[in-house]
Amino acid sequence: MPRRVPKPWPTTRFALFVLAVAFAATAAAQAFLAATTTEWWPGVVAAALTAAAVWCVAAALTG
């Protein structure tokens, strides 16, 4: 029978939530930049940061 993976510590979960908020705030700033300029790359950065925020929340909630 495989061993169960223990739940992450509360501090680890809290750190992942803090990272998710930081990534989401930065993604919002990059999305604003993408909307107000003619450059294309802030949209790509915003999408990557949004994916990172979603990953952090998913990692914090599962386990």
Image: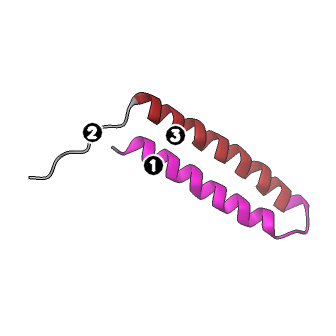
Q: Position of residue 60 (x, y in %)?
A: 44, 41
Q: Position of residue 13 (x, y in %)?
A: 45, 35
Query: Residue 61, relative to residue 32: is it above or below?
Result: above
Relative to 16, 7 lies left or right: left
SS at mark 3 in the image: helix
SS at mark 1 in the image: helix
Name of the residue lying farthest toward the left = 1
Three-letter residue code for mark 1 = Ala
Q: Position of residue 59 (x, y in %)?
A: 43, 47
- Kindly report the secondary structure that dominates the magenta region of the rendered protein: helix
CA gap between label 1 and label 3 equals 9 Å
Q: Nearer the viewer, residue 21 or 5?
A: 5
What residue span does the magenta drawing correspond to?
Answer: 35-62
| Earlier residue among tags 1 and 3 | 3
- C-beta proximity under 8 Å, tags 1 and 3: no
Q: Nearer the viewer, residue 27 or 12?
A: 12
